[in-house]
Amino acid sequence: MIELRGIHKVYQKKDTEVHALKGVDLTIEQGDIFGVIGYSGAGKSTLVRLVNYLEQPTEGHVIVDGAYLAEQSPNALRQIKKQIGMIFQHFNLLESKTIYKNVAMPLILAKKSKKEIHARVSELLEFVGLADKAINYPSELSGGQKQRVGIARALATNPKILLCDEATSALDPQTTQSILDLLQRVNKEYGITIMLITHEMSVIQKICNKVAVMEEGKIIEQGSVLDVFGHPKHQTSRNFVQTVVKTDIPRRIKDHLNQQDVHVLTKLEMVGEHATQPILATLMQRFELTVSAVFTNMTEIQDTTLAIWYLDIQGKEADKINALSYLEAQGVRVEEVSI
């Protein structure tokens, strides 16, 4: 659906060059809710603006639904861009127009008939829960309601792709959750692929199935949300994950273990049904080991449980090896970690 190959983006500022993107490769498949996360200045917003060609790459290819955007005629590019909707952090509504007119604007510009416009706008206002606000103005709406209008407007032309640039960062937590719920409905009911830019890992946790982590213009890690949350490989990824899932042992526990002369633990990462299995009892009974749970944490990611366990396993080395092999065969990720 969306493919970025070898993307570089360089801005000229007086006598200097700013390298906003450095060799980015990314594939977003149809039906994904794909999150891109990074700190300010990581290149996230530049990346998303390349997808609808508000920005053009200095080097590399942007491919949308099989079409190389750089090779399209102006008319063909316009047709492709009509299949891409976008919602923004600060809503970008026309304050002098009613909610109805704001949602209708893309259809008016596309010269659709009044009958078509009315049917589509009515459908979308009902979908986003604002059917009773058609004659109101943006100034009369809350932030969450304004973002719902932004979503309805982005959906007006029946796009295949929806780009969300920090769409919830100006909202309070409760409103953010309602907007994320709405975006999930957009994805499921309309079958729209969503690319979501954010600096909040909790947003990724709640609705994305895949994620890419950006730093200094590069993608430093990407994969399924469960994989990245359960086993982040880069320090920046770990920092983001730590904001919602405590995967590291607290310092006070580490200090206590060092005092007990315990310097190596076994870390288990379990997903789904494995997360609720009686691991300790199984290891102690089946392999005659002494097992202590030093630190555990469980969290829900899109209705799937992710469990992180740190165990102190004592016993014969052969029994321990057999136990860990057994766990790996059951689909549990096992790692020996120093503390």
Image (tube, rainbow, N blue to C red):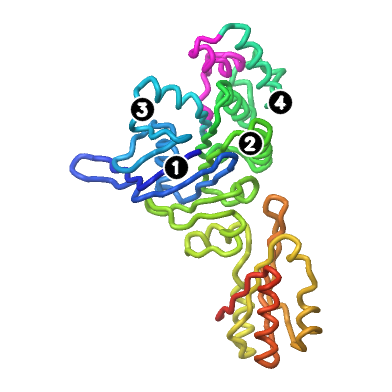
Say which mark, if any, is on residue 187. Answer: 2
In front: 176, or 119? 119
Say which mark, if any, is on residue 72. Answer: 3
Expressed as whole percent of the image width and height from the top left, the position of residue 282 reads: 79, 78
User: Left or right: 86 with respect to 272?
Assistant: left
- Marks 2 and 4 sit apart, C-alpha to C-alpha, by 16 Å
- Density class for disc 4 (Cα within 10 Å; few <14, some 14-19, many ≥20) is some
Q: Residue at x 65, y 48 (%)?
A: 206
Name which of mark 2 and mark 4 comes first in the sequence.
4
Amino acid at pointer 2: Asn
Look at mark 4 in the image and give the residue it sits on: 129
**Nearer mark to the viewer, of 2 and 4:** 2
Compared with 236, 12 (above or below) is: above
Q: Are marks 1 and 4 in contact (CB under 8 Å)?
A: no
User: Left or right: 38 with respect to 328?
Assistant: left
Amino acid at pointer 4: Gly
